[in-house]
Image (tube, rainbow, N blue to C red):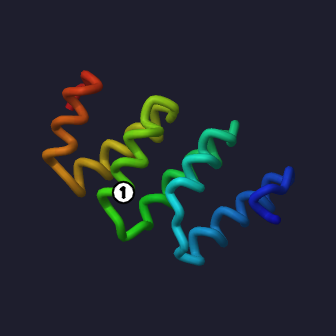
Amino acid sequence: RLLNSSDFLKRLSGYYAYSEAGLIDLDYLYKRFTDEESDIFKSVIIWTASGSKKTDDVINFYERIFKMADKRNQEFILNYIETNDIKFYNDFVEKYKLKK
């Protein structure tokens, strides 16, 4: 209920409750990311995904949303990828022609 609330604070609380529950479904988060209009909520979704213990799945999720993310979130994504898989990071930077 909270995640679908039109009230900003209730929806934000819903994302944090979802994150705290530890049941991170990256397909669900992808859908939420594409549905959300607010960069604040998109940031929370990106942060929530980083809590998954399935690093390879998180990296794949981040690759799917990278172009849709704002600059600040792209930096978070790049930092996560660089920290967790340097080879993938190097390939990713080359693929998207990013500056290291």
The answer to which quarter of the image holds residue 95 is top left
Q: Quadrant of the N terminus?
A: bottom right
Report whether 62 appears left or right of 12: left
Judged from this view, the residue extending furthest toward the bottom is 21
Total marks shown come to 1
User: Dot 1 surroundings within 10 Å: few (below 14), some, or many (20 or more)?
Assistant: some
Judged from this view, the residue extending furthest toward the front is 27
Q: Looking at the picture, how far across and down is residue 94, in whole percent?
A: 19, 27
Residue drawn 23% across the image and 48% down it: 82
Q: Is residue 44 above or below residue 15?
A: above
**In front of the other: 21 or 70:** 21
Q: Amino acid at mark 1?
A: Asp
Residue drawn 62% across the image and 39% down it: 34
Q: Looking at the picture, how far across and down is residue 87, in whole percent?
A: 13, 45
Q: Secondary structure at mark 1?
A: helix
Judged from this view, the residue extending furthest toward the left is 87
Q: Is residue 35 above or below residue 18?
A: above
Q: Looking at the picture, how far across and down is residue 26, in whole percent?
A: 50, 57
Q: Is residue 99 above or below residue 16?
A: above
**In front of the other: 30 or 7:** 30
- Residue to which mark 1 is pinned: 57
Judged from this view, the residue extending furthest toward the top is 97
Residue drawn 42% across the image and 60% down it: 50
Residue 16 visible: yes
Q: Quadrant of the C terminus?
A: top left
Residue drawn 69% across the image and 36% down it: 37
Residue 76 visible: no
The answer to which quarter of the image holds residue 3 is bottom right
